[in-house]
Image (cartoon, rainbow, N blue to C red):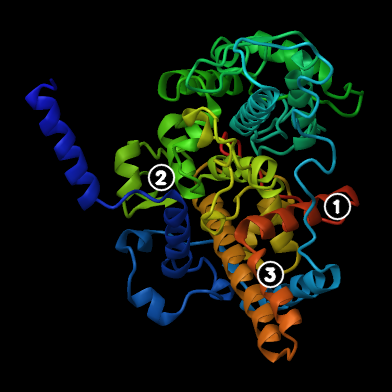
Amino acid sequence: SVPLQIIISRRQTLFFHSVLPMFSPTASVRSSCRRWMETVPPLEDGLDLTATASSLRSGHNPSFYNFKRSVAIDSSALNSFASEITDSILANKSLDVTEWDADGWHYTGAHHFGGVAVAIECAVENKRKSEFKELMRMERVALYILAMDAINFCFWPLSGVGGVDGSIKEKNGLEYEHLAIALRKLAEMDDATDNIYVTNHPNIIAASSYELSPSKLAAMTPNKLQSLLQPHFPPSTSSQSYELPNIQRRCELLKELGDGLMRNHDGSALSMISKANRSADALVRIILDSFPGFRDYVDTSDIPNTTSGWETAKSSPTVIHFYKRAQIAVADIWAALGRCQPEFTPFADSESSYKQLHNCCHFTDMNAVTTFPDYRVPQILRNVGVMKYASSLAKAVDDQVELEKSGLDEISIRAATVVAVEDLVQKVKEKLGSMAVMDDSAINRSKLDKLSEDVSAVTIDWYLWQQGEKLDRQNLLEPHHRVRTTYY
């Protein structure tokens, strides 16, 4: 029998869950960033491009009046840019976004089990073995993505950054793709080894030989991480280094990831993902609750310390939410294991605990996820005139001077990025929708509707990021802002 106090506790839990609204991290990002842009007065008169008299008088957070925002959104430039994106969609018959591993950077698990005599400890038919192998591939890819996005931040600093002005004295050539490729090579290390997998466990658990398994991550040390990654980076030259900065903090975040998966999710990434019930927003929330290192927010009542506790931050009206790495982890999982893969119909005799895992990455609410406010997207939005910087901020960014972490300039850049992409999505959808209304052909209307469905903050972010990467390689972009942060 269950003790009375436990029964009462469960009833209380059910009661509170039915009364208190569930924290939605993606909705919090949208609402807090828009509130910042619409209620905080501009630093300069020329920046008053988004706030209106009515928005400053109603629905505001009074504490925001202590601040001045240094970024504005030019609605005319945004509309023009939305037209340019719409024209590109029509010309390409899709939003020009590359697939998850089009460049060969990422781990896909395609060669795991390939040509290897793998012993599976249960007498099952070949179809069941095939089913298990696919779930194990998904588990390994999900662990790769979580590990990558746990340490996917701030590649540019070097020990050569010096001077009281924080100006850049040396260049670090390390980029996102170098980290993605290095981690891919670690993930592939045991692809061609004999492994014995036990399938009587209720979850899919990666073998201990997998370098990105939770047990390996939990035991990570800075020296070990350095020795694993550095050999896979390009060799440094006399003019350019390739090194992963802040190795200590990155090691701590990987340990946190491994510990959190083992403590809260039975050591299985798919177990964690399945708890979201195919909701991207729910998975962002689960990641934030499980791994404190992903909690990317600023409490404006305590700038620059931002020390409010997590439970308080969820509902505080003074908090600006961003959650870049948590959201991009969910988007990467969707891109790798949901978006590009057909939904799987489990075999009738599949283990009941495994059935829910097959399609757990086919999220039904990807439109809830916002853009990922980091360096590249605001850089390109400024380049096309959508985002306008105050003169003091523009000079600091152009001179490559570091901005204060969680300072007003950084908040303004990131909040404006979220709002600008949200408005771009709306404008592009409106333009495609108006074309569908005017088109006499039902077939063409259907195609336009499908094109519109594919436009979201996530796909627009990918589009902007890819355009920015191309322009940056051609040296056609002005510098991006610089902040020493572990959040992007």
**Residue 34 appears in view:** yes
> As drawn, is 267 to the left or to the right of 444?
left
Classify mark 2: helix, strand or loop: loop
**Residue at the disc numbered 3:** 450
Q: Quadrant of the N terminus?
A: top left
Binning the other alpha carbons within 10 Å of mark 3 as few (below 14), some (14 to 19) or many (20 upward) gives few
Give me the C-alpha separation between circle 1 and circle 3: 27 Å
Query: Residue type at mark 2?
Result: Ile
Q: Is residue 147 above or below residue 277?
A: above
Q: Is residue 76 visible?
A: no
Q: Residue at x 14, y 22 (%)?
A: 2
Label 2, on which residue?
303
Q: Residue at x 55, y 59 (%)?
A: 367
**Measured from the top left, where is residue 94 in percent x and y?**
78, 65
What kind of element bears circle 3?
helix
Q: Earlier in the sequence, mark 1 or mark 3?
A: 3
The residue tagged 1 is: 470
Which numbered tag is attached to residue 23? none
Residue 144: percent from left, percent from top: 66, 28
